[in-house]
Amino acid sequence: MVDTRASIIDCANLWDAWYNNSIKEGNMTKYQVHFEKTTNKGTKHGIRTINARNEAEAILKVKSVVQASFGHWVNRLANEGVHTQDKQLRQAEQQWVVLRSQGGA
């Protein structure tokens, strides 16, 4: 038998840990979290894009927002593409700031 009270407490502790540390640490990555959800017409597939520090945190956020969802998983290939694009964008912005400070732009 599953102890639901312990599961709720564990979930609350994870949420508190995320909330307390999210402001201090700024290295968030966008994750595509896929899930299934039951509706009146059957089972539907859903996707949410979430900013999180790791995959477990992204899944936890989706579970807390989407009621009655199950079968959560992260598309790692899509995540790597988003992470690479964000990194390239940040590098381009830093180069632009350097050029501007030197009077080149």
Image (cartoon, rainbow, N blue to C red):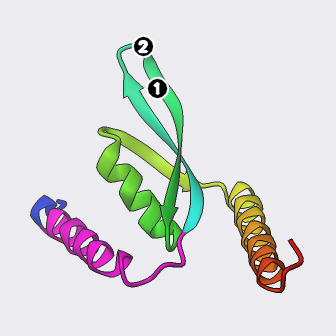
Amino acid type, callout 1: Thr
Query: To which quarter of the image does residue 21 belong?
Result: bottom left
Of 95 and 33, the residue lying toward us: 95
Asked whether the beta carbons under mark 2 and mark 1 sit within 8 Å of each other, the answer is: no
Location of residue 10 in the rendering, given as x and y in whole percent from the top left corner? 21, 71
Location of residue 83 in the rendering, given as x and y in whole percent from the top left corner? 70, 66
Location of residue 32 in the rendering, given as x and y in whole percent from the top left corner? 59, 52
- The residue at 39%/28% (across/down) is 38
- The quadrant in which the C terminus is found is bottom right
Furthest-right residue in view? Answer: 104
Answer above or below: position of 58 versus 53.
above
Q: Which residue is mark 1?
A: 43
- The residue at 75%/71% (across/down) is 93
On whether residue 16 falls in the magenta region, the answer is yes
Query: To which quarter of the image does residue 23 belong?
Result: bottom left
Tag 2 secondary structure: loop
- The residue at 16%/62% (across/down) is 8
Q: Is residue 52 left or right of residue 21?
A: right
Q: Is residue 7 left or right of residue 61?
A: left
Tag 1 secondary structure: strand
Q: Main secondary structure of the magenta part?
A: helix
Q: Is residue 52 left or right of residue 29?
A: left
Furthest-top residue in view? Answer: 41
Residue 41's disc is 2
Of 64 and 7, the residue lying toward us: 64
Answer above or below: position of 60 versus 65.
below
What span is colored magenta in the figure? 6-28
Q: CA distance from mark 2 to mark 1?
A: 7 Å
